[in-house]
Amino acid sequence: MQHILAAVDLSSITPKVAQRARELADLFGSKLSLVHVLEYRPIVYSGSEFSMPLDNSVMEVFEKNAKAALKKLGVELHVPESQQYLEVDAIKQAIVNLAEKLKVDLLVVGSHGRHGAALLLGSTANAILHAAKCDVLAVRV
């Protein structure tokens, strides 16, 4: 296993997912990269779906905060900035595309372990699992 990509959402589950990825990278002597995706979601109003453009200054704040959090995580995990990626796209597509571009062997993602109806609706981890061309490890959090 040469390269591991950890997809992090920078929430409270991130430390557990990131630490598992670091442990695997250390175990296999693999390169570790991190990715966080900023996704724009349409707003649903009275049954209609429309996209509300965000002010550029608001997006700059989101990007600045995400870059700072990713950089801090990179320092904690000994992942250089050149291996930290901030993508702006649909989450599943951005992660799968980056994994292919970097030719990673393993994607590490967090999973909330939903059951029943929530499982039928799918989740980001499930979507990545089915779309990725490499192995995917879902860390239960």
Image (spheres, grey):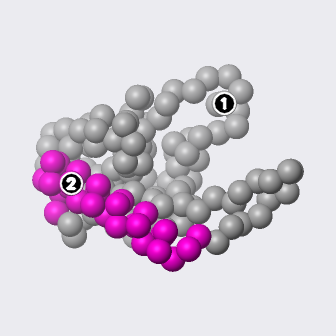
When the figure is inspected, residue 54 is found, relative to residue 47, above or below; the finding is below
Of the pair 45 and 26, the residue shown nearer to us: 45
Q: Amino acid at mark 1?
A: Ala
Are there few (<14), some (14-19), or many (20+) residues within 10 Å of tag 2? some
Residue 137, position as x, y percentages in the image: 40, 39
Q: Amino acid at mark 2?
A: Lys
Comparing labels 2 and 1, the label whose residue is closer to the camera: 2
> Tag 2, which secondary structure?
helix
The quadrant holding residue 90 is bottom right
Q: Residue at x 37, y 36 (%)?
A: 13
Residue corresponding to mark 1 = 118
The answer to the question of whether label 2 and label 1 lie on touching residues, with beta carbons closer than 8 A, is no
Residue 135, position as x, y percentages in the image: 41, 46
The span picked out in magenta is: 54-80
Magenta-colored stretch includes residue 79: yes
Residue 138, position as x, y percentages in the image: 43, 37
- Residue 59 vs residue 25: left or right? right
Q: Residue furthest top?
A: 116
Q: Residue at x 47, y 35 (%)?
A: 111
Disc number for residue 93: none
Are there few (<14), some (14-19), or many (20+) residues within 10 Å of tag 1? few
Q: Residue at x 36, y 60 (%)?
A: 66
Res 130 visible: no
Chief secondary structure of the magenta span? helix
Res 77 visible: yes
Q: Residue at x 45, y 59 (%)?
A: 37
The C terminus sits in image quarter = top left
Of the pair 49 and 124, the residue shown nearer to us: 49
Residue corresponding to mark 2 = 72
